[in-house]
Amino acid sequence: MKLLERNKTAPEQKRSGGTAKKLLRKRVVLPALACAVAGAFALQLAGGGQPASAAGLTYTTAPVERRDITAQITGSGVLEAADSYSVTSLAEGSILTADFEEGDQVEEGTVLYTIDASDLSSTLEQAQIALEQAQRSYDSRVKDLEKLSATAPEAGRVLSLEVEVGDEVSAGQTIATLRDSDTMTLKVPFLSDEAAGFSVGQRALATLESTFETLEGVVSKIDQADTVLEGGVIVRYVTVEVANPGALSPSQTGSAAIDGCASAGSAAFAYAAERSVTAEVSGQVSAIRVQEGDRVDKGGVILTLASDNLEDSLQSAADSLRNAQLSLESRYDQLENYTITSPIQGTVIDKNYKAGETSEAGKVLCSIYDLSYLTMTLSVDELDISDIAVGQKVEITADAVEGRAYTGVVTKVSVAGASSGGTTTYPVTVRVDETEGLLPGMNVDASITLQSASGVLAIPSGALNRGNTVLVTSDSPSAASGTPIEGGEYCSVPVEIGASDSSYIEITSGLQEGDTVAYIPTTGSGGFAMMMPGGMGGAAFEGGAMPGGGMANITVSGGGPGGGRGGF
């Protein structure tokens, strides 16, 4: 990648009538020349303000004229696709389909390859079976844990509690006895033909034989089988439920009537339910939720047990279930590797495998480029990076496309610099949306315009002195507003400046067309030029560099405003 630098050959590279901006920053230590500089300075003073031709110093003059000024940063780089992807295979096997060709446009998610996955089918089935087994085992452990809460199988009152808190209970052990004494049942025979017309829930009347008191009830059950009584009477038994007013007990008997039909016999009343409650699992009684005599609904908790073994067993089953799930997910993930899709929208650049060939894990099957736009990266010097900002326009030219310029835009200015040889550069990303004729890999030149001014008054860069003053000849129109120097041959005029490039500086105030500026140009071959005192700063002496002093560090200012013009 070529370093992006300011254009230093302004006369040779002009765009829009201007030249590129040049920043010259040097610090030169010339101890052997200190006396020579001091001598030259003395010659200028002794000359009474005349050109020091004896010292080889002469003024150069230039007209103040209108010019186009353009300051640019230029560089070169290589075009890259907006995005690129090398499609690789994670699975090995025979390629069944590859229905695309080089140059095809594909969408994200388009199927590119399918690979034979028959070897994976059996392991996938095994993983599915293992998961189902683990699920059943886990569900069983959950149910066992739920059984630690002993519940009432039917509604009723707690007749007795057989255990206390802290007791160890085994599966199948009786823990309580429930009795539903609020409801009494009466099971009596009816003639079979009559009973066949009855239905469950039908209204019934029960009569106590001892007091002939009648109680309203409902039919709760009708036997489907006939029973033959003594004398050959064929009956069916019907069960009637009545609410216990409080005095009924199994020692009392009664008969019933349903839909005007009387029972063919009587029977003793019975409690609707009376049964023992047993523990379904083993454990230690941790809490008793009811007391003897309390009424509980069906499913109501009577007591709870605690069992470390069951909890450990549940955790183990949960771990096994999770492992089985992960194993199955892994198999499905592997199965996805056998169907390869496009990761991006783009153009197929190359196709390395075809249908019928055998894919190899890790090998590139094809490459896809997103050519919706192109990018390039420029390395910008640390001295210039502050002039670059996101959104700046960039002019792009390519040797491969003659006579055409493209427009790009800066999309990223990275703060991650790279240092080499004492110089730090920063990567700048440029996006090019207009790409006709351009391809990834082409070398291109880029220029970023920093300043631009058309038809403005300008002077050579070397004519601007420290303090923003300019020497003009005494016959210049602007000399009247200046300060005479050099015996009146020249005048020092204050100016205001604008845009600048490597060769010229815009003058916004202080000069006019028809003026002639005078200055001592810099040289680049080891000679030097000294600017006269009186506003023109020649060499800047540091650390006792005046004549008669010791070694001097001489700072040579460049072509920008603000410093004198001395060249070494």
Image: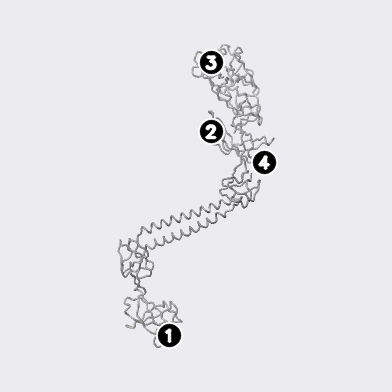
- Gap between marks 4 and 1 measured at Cα: 104 Å
- Gap between marks 3 and 1 measured at Cα: 145 Å
Q: Determine the residue located farthest toward the right in the rendered image.
A: 403
Query: Within 10 angstroms of label 2, few (less than 14), some, or many (20 or more) residues?
Result: few
- Gap between marks 2 and 4 measured at Cα: 33 Å
Q: Identity of the amino acid at label 1?
A: Ile
Residue at the disc numbered 1: 234
Tell me which label, 4 or 1, sits earlier in the chain.
Answer: 1
Kindly indicate the quadrant of the structure image that contains residue 11: top right
Q: For the residues carrying marks 2 and 4, which lies nearer the camera in this image?
A: 2
Kindly indicate the quadrant of the structure image that contains residue 562: top right
Q: Secondary structure at mark 4?
A: loop
Residue at the disc numbered 4: 436
Q: Identity of the amino acid at label 2?
A: Ala
Query: Within 10 angstroms of label 1, few (less than 14), some, or many (20 or more) residues?
Result: some
Q: For the residues carrying marks 3 and 1, which lies nearer the camera in this image?
A: 1
Q: For the residues carrying marks 2 and 3, which lies nearer the camera in this image?
A: 2
Q: Secondary structure at mark 2?
A: strand
Q: Identity of the amino acid at label 4?
A: Glu
Tell me which label, 3 or 1, sits earlier in the chain.
Answer: 3
Q: Nearer the viewer, residue 422 or 278?
A: 278
502 shown above or below 200: above
Position of the C terminus by quadrant = top right
Residue at the disc numbered 3: 32
State the image coordinates of residue 382 (x, y, percent, origin top left). 54, 31
Residue at the disc numbered 2: 418
